[in-house]
Image (tube, rainbow, N blue to C red):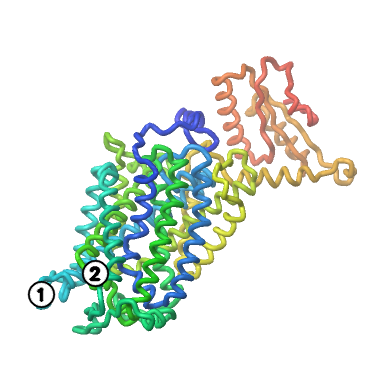
């Protein structure tokens, strides 16, 4: 074992935290409101609230939309209980969901799930950029709603020009992230006030604006308007039921369905990890993450229900299905909606890019995927992982080639659902294994909520798009296999080892020595050696002799119980494991510290002893 590996083993406790669970060296400045509630709310409020809430009501109707919302927030609530359990189970360092999952499931699963969560955040950035581009084109393109006159030509639009707009916006987001998260943290409250004001203006507009004609944005229906009725029982009744049709933003697209619309709605609930992503900057992450995440989910759920009711009562389906920016057209001051969409999407893109780069940097610091992420460890003098930001920017630039918001939404949903499944699975395994290092202070968690979370997220993942779900799981398995061979030796432990111990103990306690007979007798041999390399022939002989019995390879290391001698024993034991693997011997190994060879520990006395 190298000195760096030894230091890693010494410096981490059973949860993978620092030696007494102390906070990391980076400065922590954010409280619950600014570090968790605001980022979570802004991530959820962005694209879906302003650009797709009417689309959801127009396609699915109010009844099915509320059913979708209930299903989405039940899944979210189950996952939030798991996130709260992990975050209250000791100190939480930078890396957010990756840190929590890797310390629970082990480095192999943690690395693969962490990378999938990284991809989910990167794809989410692209989705927010698409939302901003769509709003800019609808408002300032040909026939835009914010142009000075109806005859104005507006800004040029085409597939590659729109890609250019997205590239410029992404570059601005990346530059801010390169400067550091401090700018985002300082500006986030102002953005929250702007977005909150836009939402209040939208709600007030439902009451103050009367019946009017609203232009249709659907390019298949040029120069056409639809009626905005205001509060009307007839409109409300017509909007209760579904009317699935085409999405005008996707050329030659198929008719939408319940699952298609649900996948888009669910993206408005996937911001629950935004606070966890900021774990490295939170003053008290173990308190802030559960309290802030639950508060943010409650605020968002209430706001969604309120807007769904108002939209269903005032806007006919023809308007909802042919103008996704109708909230701007019916507002008493239309620019405030554009400002709300732009700033909420921009802040969500910032939050996701910062979170993604932190996850990638945390994996690189842990040595995941070997030399492939070696450069990502680099940071500036303030600790900002600029290489991780640049790599993430490049990946998002490629994702922008997909070109449409609704086309990328299912992909983002799949990746986030897979990360949520991993959180639930981690808590479920730790609880089932009765792991002594899993003692969350969050009292509303149980293995029942974790199991329901795993089942629900997996079910929804396959319902959204089973092909993408299978592909995502295949990618995760491949990444797990790669990380199995590239992950460094760590002291976090692994959930698989905890489960194996739990099952072995369970069945060992069921053994009844009183019922044993000569026919079922198996030898149990303790083979004591001083130098394993000089005892290979004896070891192979005893290994053949034991057959289906139990062989314990033992050694007494002279010394005292101090740090230096303990580390010597650890290094020797690891060397023994490697050596015995090479000679293909199935055995248990044990090294004990003693002052002299005359002292034999009790754990050695349960087996017939052979000296070598």
Q: Residue at x 15, y 75 (%)?
A: 142
Q: x, y percentage for residue 434?
A: 64, 44
Residue placed most toward the observer, 399 or 593: 399
Q: Residue at x 42, y 73 (%)?
A: 260
Q: Kindly check if marks 2 and 1 are in contact, taking CB atoms under 8 A apart as contact.
A: no
Q: Name the mark nearer the viewer: 2 or 1.
A: 2
Q: Which of the 4 image quadrants contains residue 571?
A: top right
- Neighbourhood count class around disc 2 (C-alpha, 10 Å): few under 14, some 14–19, many 20 upward: many
- Identify the mark nearer the N-term, 2 or 1: 1
Residue placed most toward the observer, 581 or 93: 93
Q: Secondary structure at mark 1?
A: loop
Image vertical order of residue 548 relative to residue 14, above or below: below
Residue placed most toward the observer, 508 or 5: 508
Q: x, y percentage for residue 218?
A: 25, 79
Q: Residue at x 32, y 48 (%)?
A: 354
Image vertical order of residue 386 relative to residue 259, above or below: above
Q: Residue at x 38, y 31 (%)?
A: 25
- Neighbourhood count class around disc 1 (C-alpha, 10 Å): few under 14, some 14–19, many 20 upward: few
Tag 1 residue:
149
Residue placed most toward the observer, 20 or 574: 20
Q: Which of the 4 image quadrants contains residue 271?
A: bottom left
Q: Would residue 401 be seen by someone viewing this image from the given angle?
A: no
Image vertical order of residue 119 relative to residue 278, above or below: below
Judge from the rendering whether residue 305 lies leftward or rightward of residue 569; answer left or right. Answer: left
Q: x, y percentage for residue 236?
A: 39, 79
Q: x, y percentage for residue 180?
A: 27, 42
> What is the spatial separation of the Cα atoms under label 2 and label 1, in whole angstroms?
18 Å
Image vertical order of residue 224 relative to residue 129, above or below: below
Q: Secondary structure at mark 2?
A: loop
Tag 2 residue:
331
Quadrant for the C terminus in the image: top right
């Amino acid at each position: 074992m190298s000195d760096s590996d030894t230091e890693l083993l010494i410096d981490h406790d059973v949860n993978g935290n620092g030696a007494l669970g102390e906070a990391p060296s980076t400065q922590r400045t954010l409280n619950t409101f600014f570090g968790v509630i605001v980022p979570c709310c802004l991530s959820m409020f962005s694209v879906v609230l302003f650009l797709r809430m009417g689309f959801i009501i127009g396609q699915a109707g109010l009844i099915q939309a509320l059913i979708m919302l209930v299903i989405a927030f039940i899944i979210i609530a189950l996952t939030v209980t798991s996130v709260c359990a992990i975050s209250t189970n000791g100190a939480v360092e930078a890396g957010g969901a990756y840190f929590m999952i890797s310390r629970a499931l082990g480095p192999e699963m943690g690395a693969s799930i962490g990378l999938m969560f990284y991809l989910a955040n990167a794809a989410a950035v692209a989705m927010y950029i698409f939302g901003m581009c769509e709003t800019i084109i609808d408002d300032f393109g040909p026939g835009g709603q914010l142009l000075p006159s109806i005859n104005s030509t507006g800004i040029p639009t085409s597939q590659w020009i729109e890609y250019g707009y997205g590239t410029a916006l992404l570059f601005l987001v990346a530059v801010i992230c390169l400067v550091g998260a401090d700018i985002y943290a300082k500006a986030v409250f102002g953005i929250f006030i702007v977005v909150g004001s836009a939402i209040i203006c939208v709600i007030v507009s439902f009451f103050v604006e009367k019946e009017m004609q609203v232009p249709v944005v659907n390019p298949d229906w040029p120069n056409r308007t639809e009626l905005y009725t205001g509060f009307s029982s007839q409109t409300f009744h017509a909007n209760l039921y579904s009317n699935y049709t085409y999405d005008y933003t996707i050329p030659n697209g198929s008719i939408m369905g319940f699952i298609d619309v649900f996948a888009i709605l669910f993206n408005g609930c996937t911001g629950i990890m935004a606070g966890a992503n900021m774990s490295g900057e939170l003053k008290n992450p173990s308190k802030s993450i559960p309290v802030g995440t639950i508060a943010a989910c409650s605020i968002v759920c209430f706001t969604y229900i309120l807007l769904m009711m108002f939209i269903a009562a005032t806007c006919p389906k023809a308007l909802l299905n042919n103008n996704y920016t109708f909230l701007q057209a019916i507002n008493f001051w239309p620019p405030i909606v554009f400002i709300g969409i732009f700033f909420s999407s921009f802040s969500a893109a910032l939050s996701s890019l910062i979170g993604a780069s932190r996850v990638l940097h945390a994996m690189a610091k842990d040595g995941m995927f070997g030399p492939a992420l070696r450069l990502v460890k680099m940071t500036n003098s303030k600790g900002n992982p600029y290489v991780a930001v640049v790599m993430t920017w490049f990946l998002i630039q490629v994702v922008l080639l997909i070109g449409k918001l609704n086309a990328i939404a299912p992909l983002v949903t799949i990746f986030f659902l897979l990360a949520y499944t991993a959180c639930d699975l981690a808590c479920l395994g730790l609880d089932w294994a009765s792991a002594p290092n899993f003692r969350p202070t969050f009292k509303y968690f149980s293995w029942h909520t974790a199991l329901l979370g795993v089942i629900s997220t997996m079910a929804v993942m396959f319902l959204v798009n089973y092909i993408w779900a299978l592909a995502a799981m295949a990618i995760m398995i491949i990444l797990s296999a790669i990380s199995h061979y590239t992950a460094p030796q760590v002291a976090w432990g692994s959930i698989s080892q905890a489960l194996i111990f739990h099952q072995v103990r369970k069945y060992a306690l069921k053994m009844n020595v009183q019922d044993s007979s000569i026919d079922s007798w198996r030898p149990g041999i303790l083979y004591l050696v001083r130098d394993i390399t000089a005892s290979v022939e004896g070891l192979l002989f005893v290994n053949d002799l034991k057959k289906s019995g139990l062989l314990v390879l033992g050694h007494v290391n002279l010394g005292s119980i101090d740090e230096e001698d303990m580390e010597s024993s650890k290094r020797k034991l690891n060397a023994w494991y490697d050596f015995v693997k090479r000679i293909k011997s199935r055995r248990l190994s044990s090294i004990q510290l003693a002052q002299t060879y005359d002292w034999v520990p009790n754990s050695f006395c349960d087996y017939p002893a052979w000296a070598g």
